[in-house]
Image (tube, rainbow, N blue to C red):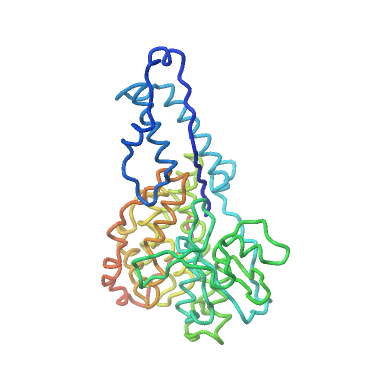
Amino acid sequence: MYSTHVSSSFISIHFPPSISKNHKHTKIHRSKLHTSTPKMSLNQNPNTTSTANLINTVTKLLWGQSLPPQLLISTVRSSWSATWQLMMSQLAPSDPSGSYTRPASQFRLYESNSPPNNLHLYVGLPCPWAHRTLMVRALKGLETSIPVSIASPGIDGSWEFRVWPDPAKEKVVPGLDIANGCKTLREVYNLRRGGYSGRSTVPMLWDVEKKEVLCNESYDIIEFFNSGLNGIAGNPELNLSPPALKEEIRKWNDIIYPNINNGVYRCGFAQSQEAYDKAAEVLFRTLEMLEDHLGGSRYLCGDVLTLADVCLFTTLIRFDLVYNVLFKCTKRKLIEFTNLHGYLRDIYQIPKVAETCNMGQIMEGYYKILFPLNPGGINPIMPSGCEDEVLSKPHNRDSLSLDSKVVQHSVS
């Protein structure tokens, strides 16, 4: 996840001759500016606050309580549009139509790789891809065997390690790098032999002994956690990818990944109206298909929780919290889908899953950091449907029959 932070230490204002002539005796005293400064919160930048006060004073001097001149509005609009396009091109690479194109992971984990003995997991709580790995790690009972360092997004969008006080004591929270003592995730990537100049993403599985990135592809990691570490897992009997269901899991992933997991990002990061309209139409058509399917099936593949459910859950848990508002996925809220929201609550209530869902950190990581999508950085109130009290309500999905209807695994 990337964002751009622009700061300014001062602004030079040049008055046109006509203004200077009419107001040649007008002076703006620093002391008067300071007396009108509102009380500043701990999160505010003092330079930004004083700059805003100066701009407010000058604009009142120039045109009083009237709206700014049309020329100024047009100029600012054009400048912001150009700047937004520039920032979005770095934040979210797109194809010629303006559709978001997700970069491929650079470090893959293949079955031929022999698993190292000393592994460490790096994650960030806002990231749905990293959330997958936290969930499977918890469900398989790998918390002791695979330690984790939880990064938080810095003001520039890069991942950094710092102590983060959080009232949600029962949830996972960001902290320090307990494996390498680095201040940023980029520093960790750079520890590998030959260094690293690519994107420093989460999740990332680290080989502690070799000081090497083992993998930064989320699906490779959850497959590995599910079946490659049973010798050290606390719950080795759990299999989230049974051989008999592998093909069905693959079919569901082929639907969920492009249309929902990546689909919400294709809505939020669209750089043209055409790209947004297409992404939103596919997203909600897929959600409606899933709503129908889950009316007769407890999980995607029947009565068995699988990796496909894990991948769907980490997007759904963020839907009303973030994607509905910030990513403009506004046609319907998830809570308006009876079966999908019941399915969400069902998985949330599985032991250890809720502990991996820190809603405050998820909101902080999106609304505060994705500057091009939310320039003001205002963090909205959490939707009531995302509160633990609501998510813990009975779902009654255990009553669904094993004889669920056959569904065509395609979205035209």
In x, y percent, where is residue 345?
33, 69
Out of 159 and 254, give the one closest to the viewer. 159
In x, y percent, where is residue 16?
46, 17
Q: Is residue 326 above or below residue 305?
A: above
**Left or right of 404: which side holds 208?**
right
In x, y percent, where is residue 195?
70, 62
Residue 320 figure quarter: bottom left
Residue found at the far front of this picture:
31
Which residue corresponds to the image point at 41% horizontal and 74% vertical from the top-left?
302
Residue found at the far right of this picture:
194
In x, y percent, where is residue 286?
43, 57
**Left or right of 199: which side holds 133?**
left
Out of 210 and 273, give the one closest to the viewer. 210
Q: Is residue 171 above or below residue 115?
A: above
**Left or right of 123: which side holds 317?**
left
Which residue corresponds to the image point at 68% horizontal and 66% vertical from the top-left?
192
Q: Is residue 78 above or below residue 391?
A: above
Q: How many marks?
A: 0
Residue 349 figure quarter: bottom left
Out of 60 and 5, give the one closest to the viewer. 60
